Amino acid sequence: DAGKGGYEHYMLKEIHEQPTSLRQTLRGRADPTTGDVILEDFPSGTFEGIRRVQFVACGTSYHAGLVGSHFIGSRGLPAQTFLASEYAVSAPPVDEETLVVGVTQSGETADTLSALRRAEAGGARTLAVTNVVGSTAARECDDALFIRAGPEIGVAATKTFSSQVVSLSLLGERLVRDAVGRRSDDVQDVLSALSDLPDHVQRILDYTKAHRIAKRYYDCDSYFFIGRGSVYPVALEGALKFKEISYEHAEGFAAGELKHGPLALVTPATPVFAVFTGRHDRKTLSNVKEVEARGAPVVAVASETNEEIVQYADDVLTIPDTHPDVAGILANVQLQLLSYHAAAQLDRPIDKPRNLAKSVTVE
Ligand code: G6P
C-alpha cells in the first residue's frame, strides 16, 4: 500500500501522475517558439530517405500507434498502424525506405517483437518506442525512443498511453521534417499545445465529473464510445479500458460507422460516449443525434468552450481548449477516470483484472 501514495489503487495514482509523467516525456524535447523538436538520439536529418512508416503494436499501444499514424499521415508522410499479431502473419512489403516502429511500453510483448523481427528480416529500418531502457525491443531495434513515463504497475495502461501519444507526436514532427523535407504548417501550435498538456491534465484531474457520471451509468447493458479522425483511436481506447477493468461490455466505433451496423444495438440502456476535438464536430454531432433518436443517453467529451454540444448531450466531460490533434490525450484522461470510477462502483479488482497480464510474452 505504501507504493500507492495514499490512493486506493495504482491505477488512480498513475492517472494522477500524468502531469508529472508528461513533463518528463516532454523535458527538453519541444520548443514551441522556434518549432524545433529535439530528440536526443535523433539529430536533424536522421530520417532522411524514409518514404513510409508502419506502426506495430498491441492493446493500448496499438491505439497510441493509430493516433501516431493519423498524425503523420495527415502531415504528408504515408503511415499505417497494424496489430502486431496480424503483422507477424501477413506483413505488407517493406524495404530500406520503410521505418517500422514498435510501440510497446514494456518492450517485451511477444507479438510486437515478432512483428519487428519480421520487418527487420524484410530489410526495414526499425525503431522501438518504449518505456523500458534495456528492454528486448530497445535492444533489438536499430533505434529506440524512450517515453519516460516512469514505472506503471496497474495492468490497465494509463500514463504510458499519454506519454506514447506525446512521444509519437514529437517523433512525427521530426519524421515529417526529415522525410518530407519541410516542417508541418502547424508545428508551433502543436508544440505549444503539448507544452500546455501537463497543466491541462491537472485541470481535468482537479475538476472532473467522471465519478458522478460513472455513478449515474454504471449499471447499463453496454457502453459505446465513438470518435472521428484523431479520436477514433481514443474511442477504441476508452472502450478497451472500460471492459478491461469493469468487466462490462464496451465497444468503440468510428462515429460514422455507427449507422452501418452498430446502431442496431443502441437502446436507452446503452450510454454512448462521444469524443469531440473541435475538428469534424458537426459530423459527429449528427451521429449523436442518431443515437439520441433511439433513446440512448449521450455523454460528450468536449472542449469547455463548445456551447453547441451542451444542447444535445445529456452530460459533458469537459476538456481545456487545445489543438485538435492533442485534444484526444485530454479526452482520454476523462475516459480513464470514467472507467476507473465505474469499476470502483462495481467493486472490481482494478489493478489486477481477471485473465489479464501487464505484459504478454507469448504469441
Ligand atoms: C497487455 C496489457 C495491455 C497492453 C498490451 C501491450 O495486453 O494488458 O495493457 O496495452 O499488453 O503492452 P505493451 O507493453 O507492448 O505496450
Image (tube, rainbow, N blue to C red):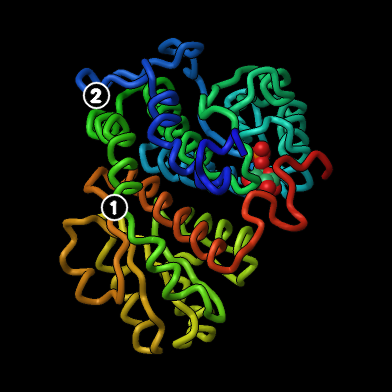
Looking at the rendered structure, the kind of residue marked 1 is Tyr
Q: In this view, does 172 lie above or below 211?
A: above
Query: Could you tell me which secondary element the residue under label 2 belongs to?
Result: loop
Query: Could you tell me which secondary element the residue under label 1 belongs to?
Result: helix
Residue at image point 74% right, 58% down? 354
Q: Which residue is under mark 2?
A: 32
Q: In this view, does 100 lie above or below 46?
A: below
Q: Is residue 23 above or below residue 340?
A: above
Q: Can residue 275 be seen in this view?
A: yes
116 vs 226, left or right, is right
Residue at image point 76% right, 30% down? 117
Q: Does any atom of ligand 1 lie closer than 8 Å to the CB of label 1?
A: no
Q: Nearer the viewer, residue 140 or 49?
A: 140
Q: Residue 84 placed where, x, y %? A: 69, 44
Neighbourhood count class around disc 1 (C-alpha, 10 Å): few under 14, some 14–19, many 20 upward: few
Q: Residue 221 placed where, x, y %? A: 56, 81
283 vs 52, left or right, is left
Q: Does any atom of ligand 1 lie closer than 8 Å to the CB of label 2?
A: no
Looking at the rendered structure, the kind of residue marked 2 is Pro
Q: Quadrant of the N terminus?
A: top right
Q: Which label is found at residue 207?
A: 1
Q: Residue 240 placed where, x, y %? A: 58, 58
Separation of residues labelled 1 and 2 (CA atoms): 27 Å
Q: Residue 322 placed where, x, y %? A: 24, 44
Q: Is residue 103 visible?
A: no
